Amino acid sequence: MASIGRSSARSLLRQTIMIAQHARFYSVASSRNMPPNRPVLKASQITRFPFARFESTVSPPKQYVYEDIKKLAENPDPEKILVDVREPAELAQEGFIPTAINIPYKSSPQALSLSEDAFEEKFGFAKPSKDKELVFYCLGGVRCNYAQELAGEFGYEKRGNYSGSWEDWVENEQAAK
């Protein structure tokens, strides 16, 4: 048996809860409210899954803190690309970390699966190559985690995550003044 990854466990838990809620609704619903040929399930039936463990094929990202990102912003490393996954309107309103490129996660989740030409046409810069390390950040650390997982699914094995993200950057920059 393989071990379960965190993201897989969260996904499985969300699906199990959704199925259990769905089952509770239909077990309480009267037959006239039920769609045709829809079986009535009980929550007890849903939770009787054999125990299974899954293995994620995506390696975990390297975790970055403010000091690491500050060094990267001041002395860019050609092997690392800082990726801001917030929407362009957020960048315009709040700013961004120097040297970062913007690949918005919410409006363009499939961006890293685009061909090089389509990517450059859409974003105005070259698609990051898979041999570079992509270091993701967002506003508070949620979207960047999802973005780095998705990048791993698209074949980007070298990934980093600045979970403190923009909020941590601003706080540390203001404290340094």
Image: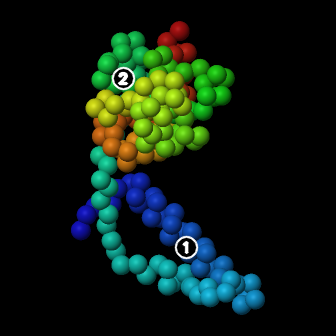
- Could you tell me the amino acid type at mark 2? Asp
Q: Residue at x 66, y 79 (%)?
A: 25
Q: Residues within 10 Å of mark 1 (few under 14, many from 20)?
A: some
* The residue positioned farthest toward the front in the image shown: 117
Q: Nearer the viewer, residue 87 or 128?
A: 128
Residue occupied by mark 1 = 19
| Residue 108: % across, % down | 54, 40
Horizontal side of 110 relative to 28 (left or right) equals: left
Q: Is residue 53 visible?
A: yes
- Could you tell me the amino acid type at mark 1? Ile
Q: Is residue 84 visible?
A: no
Relative to 109, residue 19 above or below? below
Horizontal side of 26 relative to 164 (left or right) equals: right
* The residue positioned farthest toward the right in the image shown: 32
Relative to 39, residue 10 above or below? above
Q: Quadrant of residue 73?
A: top left
Q: Residue at x 40, y 58 (%)?
A: 8
Q: What label sits on residue 33 in the rendered view? A: none
* The residue positioned farthest toward the bottom in the image shown: 31
| Residue 31: % across, % down | 71, 90
| Badge 2 element | helix
Q: Residue at x 43, y 42 (%)?
A: 113
Horizontal side of 53 relative to 148 (left or right) equals: left
| Residue 66: % across, % down | 42, 24
| Badge 1 element | helix
| Residue 151: % across, % down | 40, 42
Label located before the other in sequence (1 or 2): 1
Residue occupied by mark 2 = 68
